[in-house]
Structure formats: C-alpha cells, structure tokens
Amino acid sequence: MDRNVGFIGLGVMGKPMARNLLRAGMAVAVHNRSPQAVEELAAEGARPCRNPREVGEVSEIILTMLPDSTQVESVVTGPDSILAGARRGVLIVDMSTISPAMARALADKARSIGVGFVDAPVSGGDVGAIEATLSIMAGGTSAEFESARPLLEILGQKVLHVGESGAGQIVKACNQIVVALTLEAISEALVLGSKAGVSPQLIVEALSGGLANSRVLELRGQNFVSHNFAPGGRVALHHKDLGIALTLAREVGVPLPLTAIVDQLFQALEVKGCGAYDHSVLLTLVEELAGHSIIGETV
C-alpha cells in the first residue's frame, strides 16, 4: 500500500498507533495540539504539520484519534480543518469515540464535497494500541471501508465493518458498557475476597483461569492488585463514553440500569479529582464503601 497517510491526535492511544504506521513503512504526516509528540514522531520519520488543514493537503487518507465529539468536529470542519485542505477522493477515518449522530453528520459533510468518511473507534486500550492488537469496529460504505482496511489491519487484530455511518460508534458504546461493568465486577470481587482473607493476587490468578476471565482482567488485573492507576483508559473519557451510551439508549428506548450506576461511580471519581487516572481506579470507590483496601490500608 503506497498512500500518503495523515494522523491527528497523538495521545496515549494515537501516538503508538501513528508509530505503528511508521514502522510499517507508511509515509505519515502528523499533527497534535501539543507539539512534544509531533517532535518525537518527526524524529522517527514522520512529517510534522502545523494544523489539520496541512495534514489534509498532503494526505490521501487521514486518521484521527481525539478525545470527544467537539474536538473531532473542529478538526474535521473548523477553521484550518481537514476539509479546508482536503481534495476530492481523500478519506477520513475517525478512530475517536464520539456520538453516532456526530459521526453521521461529519460523514454527510465530508461526502458533500467528495471526501469519504469512516467512523472506526477502537477497543484494546493503550496496550492494544502499542501492540497493534486493537479491535476496530467501522461504520461507512463498503467502498470506504475497503479503502481503509489495509491501514486498519496494520493497527488492529480484528477489523470489522459493522454497518453504515455511525454504526461503529454504536458498537463502541456497547463495548464501553461491557468494559465498565466488568471493571466494577472485578473491583467488587477483589474487595470482597480480600476483606474475607484471600490474597488479591491469588484471586486474579484464579479468575483468570475460568469463566470469569476477560480481556479487562488480563490487561488490568495487575493494576488493581498494585494500585497502579497510570492512565491507559482514562476515567474522564470512559465517563464520556457511558454518557454517549445512555443518550443513545434514551433515543431508542432501552433501559440500562447497571450502566447508569457505573456512570455515576465514574462521576464520583471525577469529582474526587481522579478523571485523569486509569478507569481501574474504580476499585478505590468499592474499597471506600467497604472500609478496606486490597493492599492492606483503609482508603
């Protein structure tokens, strides 16, 4: 595959994803709001760009990985945006987690000037981004998806076309529900077992060998045990994602009672100043309720 690639958004997820494209031999133009990550990747062979418009001017396919709907909208359609610089035939692949409605609106806007648009959010966290083992769920036309597929297969282990525009974001909302409830379930299990006298490490090992095992437990089990809450999936972003799921559920008439509870637990963590921590910090709220820390101290 020999196409000029653009990548905008070089955070915890975006920087290793862009790096994987460079390692695969892609010519990659990069932009980020803060310059440090741009400078780092430029030293590895990427082309630095001053703004999204410049990325649009020099790229045939542009990937974005940004925190929320507002930032994606600004980067795609705002002043000095991708669409201000992109020519007909360019393809935008937004890998952020945003609302399905925003994904559909951006697709309509892009297509009105001859630019393709795929919503392709990911699951797998920072580890999946680094190891190129992400699960990628894509919405858009079949032609747009097939055009994006070769790049997506560099970044992910499972790449699936799930439907028309917005469908990728719908599936990502479903994903975030399962991840959030699993984090809460693991937290409750570890605090219960620990307070009842069993080593948290042994609980993780036992759960990992049976039906209770999950990718969340595999990737975050040691975070729980060691209280290492350095960000992979940030609380604030997962809270935002659950808001998307709950809004969608209201629109289509689906009750999500447990999702609503965990959404409020994430709200409590943000109020406590934990929004930038990894979402496994949810454990500490369960510890507070139990008056017991799994590492031996009351939280």
Image (spheres, helix red, strand yellow):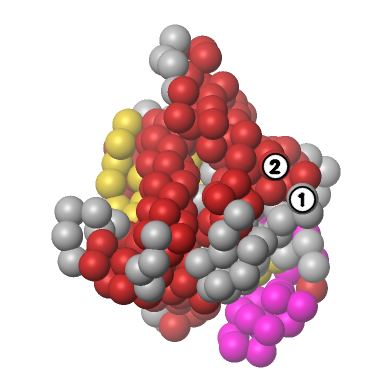
Picture quadrant of residue 201: bottom left
Amino acid type assigned to the residue bearing label 1 in the image: Lys
Q: Position of residue 297 (x, y in %)?
A: 62, 70
In this view, 167 is above or below 238: above
User: At numbered mark 1, what does the secondary structure look like: helix, strand or loop?
Assistant: loop
Q: Nearer the viewer, residue 86 or 71?
A: 71
Q: Position of residue 107 (x, y in %)?
A: 53, 32
Q: Nearer the viewer, residue 171 or 90?
A: 171
Report crowding for label 1: few under 14, some 14 to 19, many 20 or more residues within 10 A (C-alpha).
few
Query: Is the Cβ of the residue at disc 2 closer than 8 Å to that at disc 1?
Result: yes
Magenta stretch bounds:
36-63
Q: Which residue is mark 1?
A: 272
In this view, 57 is above or below 103: below
Q: Which residue is mark 2?
A: 268
Q: Is residue 16 visible?
A: no
Would you say residue 37 sits in the magenta stretch? yes
Q: What is the residue that sits farthest to the top in this orientation?
A: 253
Image quarter (top left, top right, bottom left or bottom right) of the N terminus: bottom left
Q: What is the residue that sits farthest to the right in this orientation?
A: 79
Q: Nearer the viewer, residue 94 or 216?
A: 216
User: At numbered mark 2, what does the secondary structure look like: helix, strand or loop?
Assistant: helix
